[in-house]
């Protein structure tokens, strides 16, 4: 897997990787991460097409997912204690 690009964002780290004719888009926020895979053939314009795909609406939903993940993780950890 090789890193192709990073997209600056104030709320999370966004990295784009290439592996086995797929693009892997990884979002990281603290100890949490989300990843999405797209076939290279499904993206027009290569990495620039990925930048277009990652619009603000999609990124906002990713951030909502992080909030839900964090809440679920904290709840599970509290049950564990």
Image: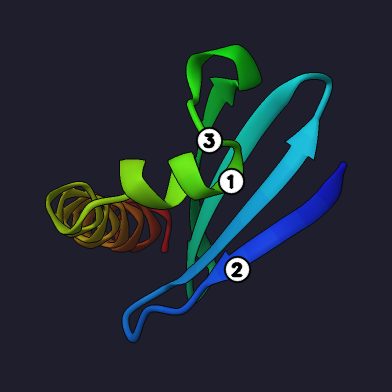
Q: Is residue 75 left or right of residue 14?
A: left
Question: As rendered, which of 63 and 48 lies closer to the eye?
Answer: 48
- Image quadrant of residue 41? top right
Q: Is residue 37 left or right of residue 74?
A: right
Residue placed under numbered mark 3 in the picture: 45
- Residue at disc 3, secondary structure: loop
- Image quadrant of residue 12? bottom left
Residue ID at (87%, 41%): 1
Crowd tier of the residue under label 1, counting other residues whose Cα lies within 10 Å: few below 14, some 14–19, many 20 or above: some
Q: How is the image coloured?
A: rainbow
What is the x, y in percent for residue 6? Answer: 60, 68
Residue placed under numbered mark 2 in the picture: 6
Query: Which of pointers 2 and 3 indicates the residue nearer the eye?
Result: 3
What is the x, y in percent for residue 71? Answer: 22, 59
Residue placed under numbered mark 1 in the picture: 47
Q: Do tag 1 and tag 3 residues touch (Cβ < 8 Å)?
A: yes
> Does label 2 or label 1 sit earlier along the sequence?
2
- Residue at disc 1, secondary structure: helix
Question: As rendered, which of 70 and 21 lies closer to the eye?
Answer: 21
Q: Is residue 24 left or right of residue 66?
A: right
Residue ID at (78%, 56%): 3
Query: Which of pointers 1 and 3 indicates the residue nearer the eye?
Result: 3
Residue ID at (50%, 15%): 42
What is the x, y in percent for residue 34? Answer: 47, 47
> Does label 2 or label 3 sit earlier along the sequence?
2
Tag count in the figure?
Answer: 3
Between marks 1 and 3, how big is the CA–CA gap? 6 Å
Between marks 2 and 3, how big is the CA–CA gap? 16 Å
């Amino acid at each position: 897997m090789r890193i192709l690009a990073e997209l600056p964002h104030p709320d999370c780290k966004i990295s784009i990787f290439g592996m086995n004719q797929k693009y892997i888009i990884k979002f990281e926020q603290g100890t949490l991460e989300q990843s999405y895979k797209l076939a290279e053939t499904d993206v027009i314009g290569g990495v620039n097409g990925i930048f277009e795909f990652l619009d603000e609406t999609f990124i906002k939903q990713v951030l909502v997912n992080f909030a839900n993940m964090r809440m679920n993780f904290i709840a599970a950890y509290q049950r564990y204690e």
